[in-house]
Amino acid sequence: YTVRQWGQQWLESKLIENTPRTHERYSGILIRFYKFLGAKADKDIASVTASEITTFRDSLAKELSVNSANLAVKTLRVCFGAAYPMTS
């Protein structure tokens, strides 16, 4: 899976589990992350580094609240954490 492919699959699975507002928030976080990654969003999910996620959080914290930036990281952690059992 690429980062974008997995994110889309994960997001679709959340349609059933979450409210529309939560789904919208997750979608916004993923869109911001894809934009942050640029072309790397279409590379293998395993290519994303912890350093990139930290840099993403720090850039979000400059635009949004620290709490919103940390929520974005938690969302990415859940999303990517769900990918690893599927790929092994």
Image: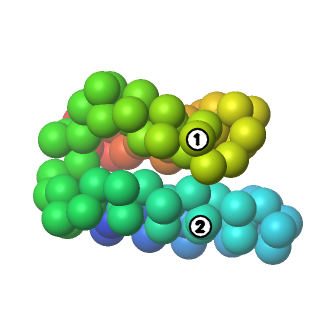
Q: Residue under label 2, please give it.
A: 27
Picture layout, residue 72 above or below residue 37: above
> Where the N terminus falls, by quadrant?
bottom left
Q: Tell me residue 38's x, y (percent).
A: 25, 63
- Amino acid carrying label 1: it is Lys
Q: Tell me residue 5's x, y (percent).
A: 32, 67
Please name the residue shown 30% across and 26% down the image: 51
Q: Is residue 6 visible?
A: no
Please name the residue shown 68% across and 47% down the image: 64
Please name the residue shown 82% across and 68% down the image: 21
Q: Nearer the viewer, mark 2 or mark 1?
A: 1
Q: Tell me residue 46's x, y (percent).
A: 20, 40
- In the image, taking residue 35 as reference, residue 62 lies left or right, namely right
Q: Are marks 2 and 1 in contact (CB under 8 Å)?
A: no
- In the image, taking residue 20 as reference, residue 13 lies left or right, namely left
Q: Is residue 88 visible?
A: yes
Q: How crowded is the residue under tag 1: few (<14 C-alpha within 10 Å), some, or many (20+)? A: few
